[in-house]
Amino acid sequence: MNSRLRLRTLFLFVFVLTSQFIFLNFVMASVDKNMTISSNVHGCILEIFLQPSDRSFGNYGTQAQIDIKYTNEVNFHTVNLITNGLGLGTYNFCANSIYPNPSSYHLYVKGVSHLRRKISSQNLFSTYLTTKDFRVSQYVLIAGEINSLKDNKVNSLDISAQILKLNTSDTISDLNKDGIVNETDLEITRKNFFLIGD
Ligand SMILES: [Ca+2]
Ligand SMILES: [Ca+2]
């Protein structure tokens, strides 16, 4: 083998080695990129639709406190939502530096004028956005919790507090959300008298 041929062989050898090195780095970078992307996917956003009782569709807005618990009843997180007319409230956990694990949770939902409702065993956070629609009869929020004691019962204390707000636009006592506290709202509380929340 003459010197020119040896040089050409050596050059080819170096070229092949360099190409493999570059290709290997490219593959490793791709794998690393994919791993980074997959590890950043969290169940961040919870969208919940709620239906307060004795409202007409499109008039479901309320404030709600939702205690999210593990199935062993240990509290995971409490979320305060303001829902719109369709009953939709949204909470972004990741924006609050909370990164929930996909799992089954119990939700305890309490509207601002409503008894607490337990919604059991909901699978949450398996995708970036979880949407739950609880606008069905079994999950309707029962109205009549007016008194500031918030004892999770509808009783005489609630009626008394509501009577004091008659003919005002008090948002707690205006149960049907027509803008005025009147006999219709008192009747809702009477209807739910003695009911107890979860
Ligand atoms: Ca009460
Ligand atoms: Ca009213």
Image: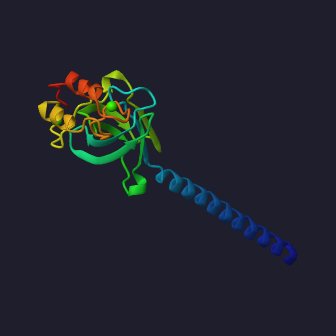
> Closest to the observer: 2 or 49?
49
Residue 170, given in percent of the width and then of the height, sits at 30, 41
Residue 117, given in percent of the width and then of the height, sits at 26, 32
Residue with the most extreme bottom position: 3
So how many labels did they put on this image? 0
The residue drawn where x is 15% and y is 35% is 160
Question: Is residue 43 visible to the viewer in this orientation of the structure?
Answer: no
Does 42 sit above or below residue 112? below
Q: Quick one: quadrant of the N terminus?
A: bottom right
Question: Is residue 20 visible to the viewer in this orientation of the structure?
Answer: yes
The residue drawn where x is 22% and y is 27% is 189
> Closest to the observer: 131 or 104?
131
Q: What kind of colouring is applied to the model shown?
A: rainbow
Residue 183, given in percent of the width and then of the height, sits at 27, 26
Q: Is residue 146 left or right of residue 36?
A: left
The residue drawn where x is 75% and y is 68% is 15
Residue with the most extreme front position: 167
Query: Residue 59's image quarter?
Result: top left
> Closest to the observer: 47 or 183?
183
Query: Residue 97's image quarter?
Result: bottom left
Does 35 sit above or below residue 186? below
**Quadrant assignment for ligand 1:** top left
Q: Is residue 93 left or right of residue 198?
A: right
Q: Quick one: quadrant of the C terminus?
A: top left
Residue 126, given in percent of the width and then of the height, sits at 42, 40
